[in-house]
Amino acid sequence: MSVSLQHKNILYYTKIMNSLKEIDLVLVNETDKCTLYTIQFQNENESEYERFYNKFKDEAEYNPDLMRIVAFINKISQNGAFERFFRPEGKMSDHVVALPVISSKLRLYCLRLSDKILILGNGGVKNSRTYNEDDALSGYVITLQNFERILKEGQQKGIVIITEKAIEIKDDDSETSENVSL
Amino acid sequence: MKTINSKFQQMVANVPKDVMTEVDLSFDIASEIDALMQEIGLSKKQFADALGKKPSEVTKWLSGQHNFTIRTIAMLSSFFGKPIIRVATNRYVFPEEKTPMVADDSSFSFGKKKEAVADRLLKALEENRQAMIARNEPELTLEEINAEIAAARAEMKARKEKE
């Protein structure tokens, strides 16, 4: 391998590690049917799912829909994150989905990696026809799309391991640049 | 790895009981429909076509978040030929599956139960007979109908004794 290619790989590895350092993967709940995660930005005190919850818990108009989403996520945790429970969002090439499927102005965006791994994101009130027309909603979707891309790149470089029902991210210390100079 | 499990449990605990029950019911009904579809080997499209519904309607049913009406539940129960849900008392759903009522309940004696089952069987046989006529198949004779009823009664008796 040429020096420049090796250098490029190290830079790439560093970029993935830095991206992963900016966002923490947070465990929400774990059962034999499904593991729920959420993500948390380094500059935030709360995870994305907590931010979503806290945003609407005291909003009289949206609280009933929020409660249904919370109860439904609990059911998913006990039974599995099957495709039929979600509304496909994002692009064909990603795994971003939304809750609920039924009519509701509230949307929670998630990353459904499999029936057994679900990453909860943030969400909001959907007043526009598509999420693309709303900057905040679009931002939540893009965040999950980017996180999925980081996970995929990390997987390719051996930094991220996705098993049947868990995501493992290796520490920076446990890796050497040799791991990425393949 | 950081965890917010205790916060998650707290969020779930904050869900009002009626909302939790509503979500439980919708989720379980959806799972039952999904299982019955798989049992028969029906795709979402085939299922929708068979019921004369749009696939998007079936998507809602299977989402586990749909607020089912009694009419839809009855229609689905009828389609699958078995109950989708059971009422807690089991009193008004599917008479042949009821347990005998209390002794002083004169409106529902064991004899009446048998009568109800026989009525149901006769109704089913009549429907079958009409279907056979529509298909230009030879009609059953009265003897054959009686034989069918006797066989069904014997089967019911055997099942009862087994229980």
Image (cartoon, rainbow, N blue to C red):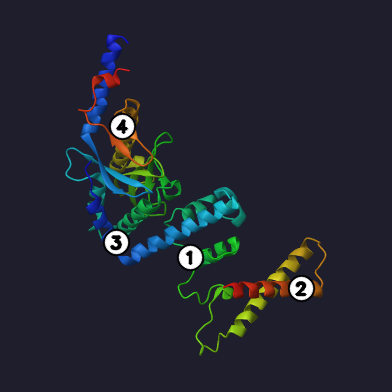
Q: Residue at x 28, y 11 (%)?
A: A4
Q: Nearer the viewer, mark 1 or mark 3?
A: 3
Give residue B69's mark: 1
Mark 1 residue type: Thr
Q: CA distance from mark 3 to mark 2?
A: 56 Å
Q: Nearer the viewer, mark 4 or mark 3?
A: 4
Whether pointer 3 and pointer 2 mark residues with C-beta atoms closer than 8 Å, the reply is no
Chain of the residue where label 3 is placed in the rendered structure: B
Q: Closer to the N terminus: mark 3 or mark 2?
A: 3
Q: Nearer the viewer, mark 1 or mark 2?
A: 2
Q: Chain of mark 4?
A: A
* Residue bearing mark 4: A160
Considering the numbered disc 3 on the image, is that residue within a helix, a strand or a loop?
Answer: loop
Please check whether the numbered discs 1 and 3 fall on a single chain.
Answer: yes
Q: A133 or B56: nearer the eye?
A: B56
**Residue A163 versus residue A88: which sits nearer the camera?**
A163
Relative to residue B24, is residue A20 depicted above or below?
above
Residue bearing the label numbered 2: B147
Q: Residues within 10 Å of mark 1 (few under 14, many from 20)?
A: few
Mark number, residue B77: none
What subunit carries mark 1?
A: B
- Relative horizontal placement of residue A157, taking residue A84 as reference (left or right): left
Q: Amino acid at mark 3?
A: Val
Left or right of A101? Residue A179 is left
Is disc 1 in contact with disc 2, using a CB cutoff of under 8 Å? no
Q: Tell me the CA gap for discs 4 and 2.
A: 69 Å
**Residue type at tag 2:** Ala
Q: Secondary structure at mark 4?
A: strand
- How far separated are the C-alphas under marks 4 and 3? 35 Å
The quarter of the displayed image where residue B96 is located: bottom right
- Are the residues tagged 4 and 3 within 8 Å (C-beta)? no
Q: Quadrant of the N terminus of chain A?
A: top left
